Image: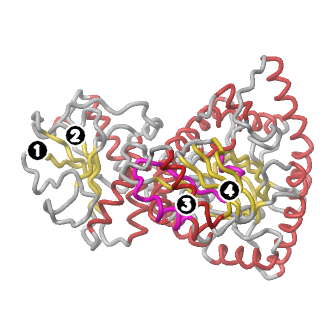
Amino acid sequence: MKYTRRKTISVNVGGVMIGSDYPIRVQSMTNTTTTDIEASVAQCRRIAEAGGEIVRLTAQGVREADAIGQIRAQLRGEGCNVPLVADIHFNPRAAFAAAQVTDKVRINPGNFVDPARQFKRVEYSDEEYAAELGRIREALLPFIALCREHGTAVRLGVNHGSLSDRIMSRYGNTAAGMVESVMEFLRVFKAERFEQVVISMKASNVVVMVESVQLLVRAMDREDMHYPLHLGVTEAGFGEDGRIKSAVGIGTLLSQGLGDTIRVSLSEDPEAEIPVARKLVDYITSRSGDDTCDDDDETAYEIAPQRRITTVVNGNIGGGKPPVVLASGERGSLQTELQPDYYPQSDTAIHWAEVAADTPVDKLPEIQPDTVLVVIPSGANVPGSQISFIRRVKDAGIECPVIVKNTYADTDREWLQVKAGADLGAVMMSGLADGVWLDAPSYADGAEVVSIAYSILQATRQRISHTEFISCPGCGRTMFDLQTTVRRVKEATQHLRHLKIGVMGCVVNGPGEMADADYGYVGAARHKISLYRGKECVEKNIPEEDAIERLLGLIESDSRTER
């Protein structure tokens, strides 16, 4: 669990090198209309000036792909050399056009060759399935040749929300399906000896995103592939939740040494993503050279199929119960609706035994029936030291609950979200801990500290405390003012804490990501909205001004309005 980067080959994206021999790159994506050259150039410059090292633009068709070439030429003429990436869905012709004028082309294995998904089960014999793989190869060969000719890199970008019906029919809407979707393409690229490939595996569900990347790395290792990884939580959302979901997912993988370029997808101005990404990269890479955690087990950060078996203390700590939230101070000190479960300073009936993560097991205090171990990190590798400690406790047969306590001093709100999300999220997804204690003595708002702790547990899907909003970051395909709409939907539905609600700017990933949401609000055309129940479209092309009221009506008609 010592922090070391996974070794990869190097990929050249317009002069910016991606791979383990180079720094982890941060990037973003424009939300302008790609054919609006002046607006797109201006936004690319703002992203670059904020520290973005690569910029992606959507290319729905050949016209948009050609526009990216014009944007690139104008930026170069103005002295801005930030590499540009064309984002392609459903349209191979656009990919071929973009390969000639951009620095990298992102294609989605879910819709580059396979037809648009209909969420229908399709049965294939082994011979028919092999024929489909042959069709993929034939479609990729001229694309690979064109990218080789023009020195254009490729990103194979799999989204949980856009797996093809063919893949879902054989593998389900699963992390394993995501892995096979990209491996089918990678085998063709490897056979053609084309190595300028970066891979991404994204989902709005953080657990699925982390699991899919971990499974992919194992699959690539088995087939001697060493391509760099692009990390991101798609549709992470807005504000605090967006930052925390990204920190939990990306941070867990970076802590494992996985990831060579990242994008933090927020439903905000693209340039707002860059400082969050930079903080995350700087925080994780600062562990390089830390020797306090010498456990080098590569499985330490892997998603646990089940929680560590522990005894139950006080009826709700451990024993498979939802993780608890602890807070500093005394009971009653926070005037907020969302309260911690315990204040150790006040709840003295429980024996809270605080220990450092480097404490040997034989030096632990005596374990009583009411003992709860509270482990504080040792050294710069915060989650690594805590995971290593709990694994030693588990191996010794000690079954008392363990709480992870992290203290962050002299940090602002965004830094706190990033650090706590990356550290606590990684430990909680390992399935080893029974609760979290987030301590920020210099941070004035204790209620917000508690809120961050609950948001981390929600991001890891271990405890739901508020409405979950799944919202895309927006791009040139977005059919409405995304930021304003997200705020309006959130204000109207935030009391529905038991629900997951998606707000998607277009139909590319919307219906697929809706499969992980209870209800969806999806851009169907300019200022027209379609409403989804799960992945089923129940109302089409509603005028935008009526859509929120109709969404609330749909939820009420389903008797899902309980708080």
User: Residue 19: x and y, percent?
Assistant: 65, 53
Please, what is the three-letter code of the amino acid marked with disc 3? Answer: Glu
Q: Is residue 196 above or below residue 77?
A: above
- Which residue is denoted by mark 1 in the rendering? 350
Q: SS of the residue at dot 4?
A: strand
User: Residue 125: x and y, percent?
Assistant: 78, 17
Camera-nearest residue between 300 and 495: 495
Q: Sequence order check: which comes first, mark 1 or mark 2?
A: 2
Q: Sequence order check: which comes first, mark 4 or mark 1?
A: 4
Which dot, 3 or 4, sits closer to the camera? 3
- Residue 506 sits in quarter: bottom right
Q: Mark 2: few, some, or many residues within 10 Å (few <14, many ≥20)? A: many
Which dot, 3 or 1, sits closer to the camera? 3
Residue drawn 57% across the image and 45% down it = 6
Please state if 311 lies on the left or on the right of 193 as rendered: left
Residue 332 is tagged as none
Q: SS of the residue at dot 1?
A: loop
Q: Residues at badges 1 and 2 in contact (C-beta under 8 Å)? A: yes
Which dot, 2 or 3, sits closer to the camera? 3
Residue drawn 87% across the image and 32% down it = 135
Mark 2 to mark 3 CA distance (whole Å): 41 Å
Q: Sequence order check: which comes first, mark 2 or mark 4?
A: 4
Residue 549 is tagged as 3
- Which residue is denoted by mark 2 in the rendering? 317
Would you say residue 497 sits in the magenta stretch? yes
Q: Which residues are magenta?
A: 486-511
Please, what is the three-letter code of the amino acid marked with disc 2? Answer: Ile
Mark 4 to mark 1 CA distance (whole Å): 50 Å
Q: Is residue 518 above or below residue 308?
A: below
- Which residue is denoted by mark 4 in the rendering? 18
Q: Sequence order check: which comes first, mark 2 or mark 3?
A: 2
